[in-house]
Amino acid sequence: MHISEGVLTPQVLVAGAAIAAAGTAVGLKKMDYDHIPKIAVLTAAFFVASLIHVPVGPASVHLTLNGLLGLMIGWAAFPAILIGLLLQALLFQFGGLTVLGVNAVNMGLPALIVYLLFGYFIKKDNAALTIVCSFLAGSVAVLLSILFTAFSLLFSGQEFINIVKIMVIAHIPVVIIEGVVNAFIVTLLKKVKPEILEFSRAIADNA
């Protein structure tokens, strides 16, 4: 779901950069710096997962794990995703620097949304609730990223409508797979290392 350079209009680029700057600023402000090692590991996981692309027509699909980042680090997911995308743009030319803000919004904002929707429930002592909410968090995060990416393209020109249709259809299996992967990881962590799922006090107090 990386949008490449030279595709979007200046208006969309500026709007994306502004929202990304605001989200990153709030994320850094709310970040518990004692959790930087955990945030770094999750940033690396996001970086690696997004590198594995499967071409589908003019688009490509890949895991994002942005739902997992949202559940585990809350607001800090936004700067973490921004750093991951920046490294991908610099090292592998995925996306680009001018579209960095838009791509960060398309993946970071869904992470925040699922954190606000499901983050509270995965900490409950209820295995079934954890599985359901973590599955939904993974699936909804990808679904929202697809929709945000689609709107970013459509706001830049109706000529992208066919590409948007292909992209949405191609990512339907990813929505399901991401939910399953997310549920598996969260459930496993809750069993073997439950403390890693606890948000920092600064983040939890603002939930």
Image (cartoon, rainbow, N blue to C red):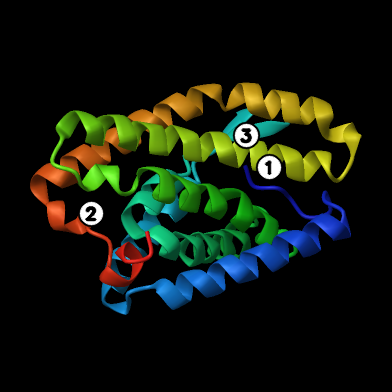
Depth check: give the residue in front, 86 or 172: 172
* Furthest-left residue in this view: 192
The residue that mark 1 highlights is 149
Q: Is residue 126 left or right of residue 110?
A: left
Q: Three-letter amino acid code at disc 3?
A: Ser
The answer to whether any part of residue 162 appears in the image is: yes
Quarter of the image containing the N terminus? top right
The residue that mark 2 highlights is 197
Q: Three-letter amino acid code at disc 2?
A: Leu
Q: What residue sits 30% from the left and 29% below the top?
A: 132
How many other residues sit within 10 Å of disc 1, few (<14), some (14-19) or many (≥20)? many
Could you say which quadrant of the image residue 205 lies in? bottom left
How many other residues sit within 10 Å of disc 2, few (<14), some (14-19) or many (≥20)? some
Could you say which quadrant of the image residue 14 lies in? bottom right
Question: Dot 1 lies on which element?
Answer: helix
Question: Dot 2 lies on which element?
Answer: helix
Judge whether 70 appears above or below 124 on screen: below
Residue 118: image location, x then y, percent: 36, 43
Quarter of the image containing the C terminus? bottom left
Residue 152: image location, x then y, percent: 75, 45
- Judged by depth in the image, the label closer to the viewer, 3 or 2, is 2
Judge whether 169 appears above or below 83 on screen: above
The residue that mark 3 highlights is 60
CB under 8 Å between discs 3 and 1: no
Residue 157: image location, x then y, percent: 89, 40
For marks 3 and 2, give the CA distance: 31 Å
Q: Is residue 126 left or right of residue 179?
A: left
| Sooner in the amino-acid sequence: mark 2 or mark 1 | 1
